[in-house]
Amino acid sequence: SSSATIDITSGIDSTYKEYVFKFINIHPANDDVSFQFQADVGTGTSYAQTITSTMFRATHGEDASSEALAYLTGGDQAQGTAFQPLASSVGNDADQNLVGYLDLYNPSSTTFTTHFIGEFQSIAHSNRSNHQFPAGYVNMTAAVTRVRFKFSGGNIDTGTIKMYGVS
């Protein structure tokens, strides 16, 4: 709780070909922020690897407004090194948070890129239900050994992040 970033710096290795991160009741300290991730290699701490990605969202308001299925231009990167959005516009009211998962595929490969897919459900600051789908790849052939999770502004107020290796 009350952490600016959550870094997973061990356990991502060649033991498994897939790593799944589960996010349970992640609540931001600030309002209207995006939950994001970035990867790194070796013992690096730059968290600025090149990512190519896409993202879309289904949304619906509590008052039956804002229903839409849309591509999110702010959720994609074309060879970018920024943090990758996973869930956008997350609110910080007492009843607003996010849940979801992120899969990393074969992060230890030094031949192929590391692909990722995710699915996130969040309550937006404007009381909308957002169901978001980020996907892409970390465009390098070095082994991904660590990941960082954070909000675009402020701290992670509370929540649980679990990592699983899948054989």
Image: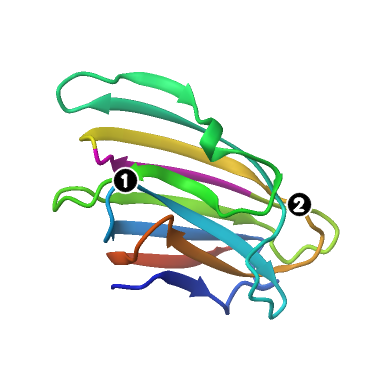
Q: Is residue 90 magenta?
A: no
Count neighbours of disc 1 (C-alpha within 10 A) and say few if under 14, some if 14 to 19, many if 20 or more: some
Q: Is residue 159 visible?
A: no
Magenta residues span: 116-125
Q: Position of residue 66 (x, y in %)?
A: 28, 20
Q: Position of residue 98 (x, y in %)?
A: 31, 50
Q: Foreground: 9 or 157? A: 157
Q: Residue at x 37, y 58 (%)?
A: 23
Vertical arrangement, residue 126 with respect to residue 28, above or below:
above
Between tags 2 and 1, which lies in front?
1
Q: Amino acid at mark 2?
A: Asn
- Mark 1 lies on a secondary structure that is loop
Count neighbours of disc 2 (C-alpha within 10 A) and say few if under 14, some if 14 to 19, many if 20 or more: some
Left or right of residue 23, residue 7 in this image: right
Q: Is residue 123 magenta?
A: yes
* First-in-chain label (2 vs 1): 1
- Mark 2 lies on a secondary structure that is loop
Residue on which the image places disc 2: 139
Q: Residue at x 35, y 73 (%)?
A: 3
Left or right of residue 143, residue 125 in this image: left
Count of labels shown? Answer: 2
Q: Amino acid at mark 1?
A: Asp
Residue on which the image places disc 1: 32
Vertical arrangement, residue 100 with respect to residue 144, above or below:
above
Q: Residue at x 26, y 61 (%)?
A: 29
Q: Position of residue 144 (x, y in %)?
A: 69, 66
Assign the C terminus to one quadrant of the image.
bottom right
Measured in 3D between alpha carbons, the distance from the residue under mark 2 to the one under mark 1, in whole angstroms, is 29 Å
Q: Which mark is residue 11?
A: none
Q: Quadrant of residue 1?
A: bottom left
